[in-house]
Amino acid sequence: MKAFGGSGKRYVDQSRLMAHQRDYAVGAQKSYPGQEDFRMKTLAILLIASGTISAQPAPPPPPPPPPAAAAAGGKATCGVVSPDAAKMEFDAVSVKPVQTRGSGDAEIDGGPGSNDPGRVTMPRMLPAYLIFIAYDLWSDQLQGPAWMASETDHLFTISATMPATTTKEQYCGMLRNLLAERFHLTFHHETQPRPGYELTVLPGGPKFKQYAPEQSDAGIGPTAGTDANGFRVMLPNQPTYVAQLRTQSGLVKLSYRNTMARFARFIGAQMSPNRGGPSNEPQPRIADKTGLAGSWDIRLEYQIPPLNPNAPPPPDGAAQATTPEGPSIFAAVQQQLGLKLQKVRDVPIDVLVVDHIDQTPTDN
């Protein structure tokens, strides 16, 4: 049986899930629990590997979410679900197979924190992606049969209803019960090592500013929606933001607003040889040791090396050189941000190993 994850096996490619996750990152109105964390694990895949965002004229950032969505779009994830929430079930669920991915890649509409909190619709959802969301996993934290990530014959349209007052945590419990009852998912946990790094502040202090809602960049750059240095403008009413512009040669201009812990997770995916895509190699884990609290506005320009899914992560940031066009992410973090990425011992992580999952879910 073909499988993904594990030694000599293939990690799930999350790149197809990134379109709607990018919308959430820049403040779009679609939202679901754990979405922000999930995107931080994989955002680099879509923005860079797929070339969706490039150094072409870009439209202004989308409008911020309505107050209800913004309030609900906090730091809650599906990583921890209480025993009471774990018992929650959707009022009604429909799971139907679809044959091709088509448009609307892995899109999720509705749910807690959205404009339609009592209903959620997933037009084209893979079982692997549903597990990622329900258990708040990185791509290298899930191992199981390869068909779970097949985009040709194991896609499902899922529609579900719930009370409009459902919390994110309760919603996570509902997703887990959906997987258990309709797909008969069973699994066990294993502890596996991942490359470890620490993100620290250099003696001179950070070279970037803390997010201030009352301040705004002026969109006077060379293309629409960019500042004077060519970075995407981060509007003051957007508490979190991620956007990248890139050239054909791989030079990236990153605009990022969030906590340092989130930033550490994001650049961990950038450091991966395949930037979070399918690979036999695990993704590095970066511990935030900066001591910088709150949200920060970060602008970073760095060079992306060619994708090399089977290359090991770099051993130490100090050894990373500058390319003819731009610095590596290690050099850029140090030179432009006043931070340092330092290799440390491997980090033990929890991996969800699928024991059984039905290819054909229980009838509606």
Image (cartoon, rainbow, N blue to C red):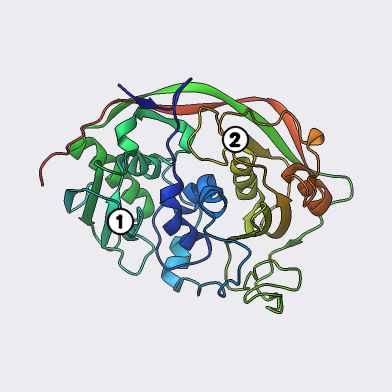
Res 228 label = none
Q: Percent from the top left, x then y, of residue 78?
A: 41, 44
116 over 183 or under it: above or below: below
The answer to whether one can see residue 207 in this image is: yes
Q: Percent from the top left, x then y, of residue 239?
A: 58, 65
Is 85 in front, or is 203? 203
Q: Residue shown at 69%/33% (left/top)?
A: 197
Q: Residue shown at 85%/51% (left/top)?
A: 205
Taking the image as shown, residue 74 lies to the left or right of residue 179, namely right
- Identify residue type, mark 2: Asn
Q: Residue shown at 72%/60% (left/top)?
A: 299
Is 93 in front, or is 21? 21
Q: Which residue matches tag 2? A: 308
The answer to whether one can see residue 87 in this image is: no
- Identify residue type, mark 1: Gly
Q: Residue shown at 44%/62% (left/top)?
A: 72
Q: Are marks 1 and 2 in contact (CB under 8 Å)?
A: no
* Residue furthest left in the image: 363
Q: Quadrant of residue 314?
A: top right
Q: Secondary structure at mark 2?
A: loop
Q: Percent from the top left, x then y, of residue 340?
A: 78, 42
Q: Secondary structure at mark 1?
A: loop
Taking the image as shown, residue 156 lies to the left or right of residue 32, namely left
Q: Which residue matches tag 1? A: 102
Quadrant for the N terminus in the image? top left
